[in-house]
Image (tube, grey):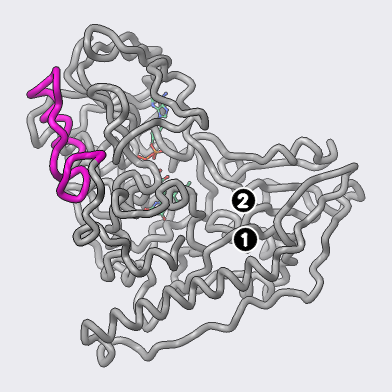
Amino acid sequence: MRTTTVIIGAGHAGLAMSRCLSERGIDHVVLERGEVANSWKRERWDSLRLLTPNWQSRLPGYAYQGDDPDGYRDMAQTIAYIETYAEVISAPVHTHTRVTSVSARDGGYRVSTDEGEWQCRTLVLASGACNIPVIPKVAEGAPPGVHMLSPTQYRNPQGLEQGGVLVVGASASGIQIAAEIQRSGRPVTLAVGEHIRAPRVYRGRDIQWWMDAVGVLDERYDSIDDLNRARSVPSLQLAGSDERRMLDLNTLSDAGVKLVGRLAGINAGKAQFSGSLGNLCALSDLKMNRLLESIDAWASAHGLDGEVDAAQRFEPTRVQAAPPLGMDLSDGAIRTIIWATGFRPDYSWLEVPVLDRKGRVRHDGGVVDAPGMYLMGMQFLRRRKSALIDGAGDDARDLSAHLADYLDRPRRPRPLPDLACGRAPNNTPDSSTCATHPLSTAVM
Ligand SMILES: Cc1cc2nc3c(=O)[nH]c(=O)nc-3n(C[C@H](O)[C@H](O)[C@H](O)COP(=O)(O)OP(=O)(O)OC[C@H]3O[C@@H](n4cnc5c(N)ncnc54)[C@H](O)[C@@H]3O)c2cc1C
């Protein structure tokens, strides 16, 4: 079978690209190993709600129409939202079609699937950033009686054995799961590494509203001093709830969760925690305060002081003077470890040599280092918001423009001015137009 473009993955990123290609009249298919919104259907826990408010799930040609713009979708609503989008844009999705290999052929790509083979000139990798949980090597030292799960396997506390739970990682997934398990009556210990603390609501507005209004989410990949760092920062400590509650280490401590430092190793059945908990929390508080100061300055400069609530500061994170540095994992007190330690993409099927030594796709703002190949949905792909639902639209518009240009000039694609702050890629950034946003230091 032949088509001009194959998009791999029918999550919101692949669908946003599909919509942009349709607008340009570019013939394409979307190949999906499961169903539309498969990750949300198969790889998320039951109680998860988006941490971005409803208004902030804008996809090309599809904005929020409901009467609860400040609410946070649960999983059923998120799935329905993405499924409806696929229908509204008439995306040419082939479900239950798993891509098993992609190789270069005839100036384009051969895409093999368990439902046959496709030949295309251009290819979009929208297969997700969170396919495989990253579980540190220290996990190998855990005693055999301790059950281990990743957030993609965890569903709800009832699915766990009775007894204590060690949650490793205190970013969005870790803190949400820790809070829910503690509420179920199982004692939770949370191993805290680097994390980014943020209030849910600040001065009466959602923190995401501020980040959007101030422009920090639109900050571009080619304006960042340390892009590798920006692409690996942990998610903000946020959760969606009807009460718009702040969820941080203080609220977890109040609920009875025991905080310990970063899990450094497991030796002879004993977990070893780093002594850096106090420092990490102090750093996180400092960064949060820097973020709030920047928001205050921006609000004043834009005449919002009379419109929003007064500025406020939050209690510093409370940490035990000498948190435990070790814990016996073999005495039966801890029955489960949940590794909320991040995710990575799976490109085991990609036979085109575009991966770097860490297994990441080499790309310039989503334009992959192989002719006619594009990437979507990665953290800070083109903008700080790229991995959010809200970020896919702008990225898909930019990259579909580049793809169309490539199809017009198959042998020598012109770099589009848009791709590097008004200049061609690889030029030195123009600091007048590409200045790092003052808030970015607060969220990195
Ligand atoms: C726990 C969690 C919470 C999140 N919360 C939010 C939030 O509140 N707000 C927000 O904006 N973002 C959130 N995100 C980030 C982001 O929106 C999601 O990760 C989103 O699922 C990414 O969309 P995507 O289209 O890039 O990838 P996915 O939704 O993962 O879609 C990729 C698709 O590709 C398919 N696929 C993969 N490999 C193959 C193959 N070989 N062949 C065929 N198909 C394949 C998969 O089945 C999947 O359907 C969250 C992410 C996680 C992990």
Could you tell me how many numbered marks the image carries? 2
User: Residue 100: horizontal and vertical position, in percent?
Assistant: 42, 15
User: Residue 265: horizontal and vertical position, in percent?
Assistant: 78, 46
Q: Could you classify mark 2 by the number of other residues whose Cα lies within 10 Å: few (under 14), some (14-19), or many (20 or more)? A: some
Give me the residue at 70% from left, 56% from top.
262
> What's drawn in magenta, residue-wise?
399-426
Asked if residue 444 is positioned above or below residue 362 in the image, the reply reads below
- In magenta segment, residue 87: no
Asked if residue 7 is positioned above or below residue 341 in the image, the reply reads above
User: Residue 199: horizontal and vertical position, in percent?
Assistant: 47, 74
Give me the residue at 26% from left, 92% from top.
306
Whether residue 6 is visible here, answered yes or no, is no
Give me the residue at 45% from left, 64% from top.
240
Asked if residue 431 is positioned above or below residue 373 in the image, the reply reads below
Residue 127: quadrant of the picture: top left
- In magenta segment, residue 414: yes
Answer whether labels 2 and 1 touch (C-beta < 8 Å).
yes
Q: Secondary structure at mark 2?
A: loop
Q: Could you classify mark 1 by the number of other residues whose Cα lies within 10 Å: few (under 14), some (14-19), or many (20 or more)? A: some
Q: Name the amino acid type tagged 2.
A: Asn
Numbered mark located on residue 417 in the image:
none
Whether residue 367 is visible here, answered yes or no, is yes
Residue 36: quadrant of the picture: top left
Q: Quadrant of ligand 1?
A: top left
Marks 2 and 1, the one that precedes in the sequence:
2
User: Which residue is label 1 attached to?
Assistant: 180
Front in this rendered view, residue 75 or 208? 208
Q: Name the amino acid type tagged 1.
A: Glu
Numbered mark located on residue 156 in the image:
2
Report, in whole angstroms, how far the alpha carbon at label 2 lies from the one at label 1: 8 Å
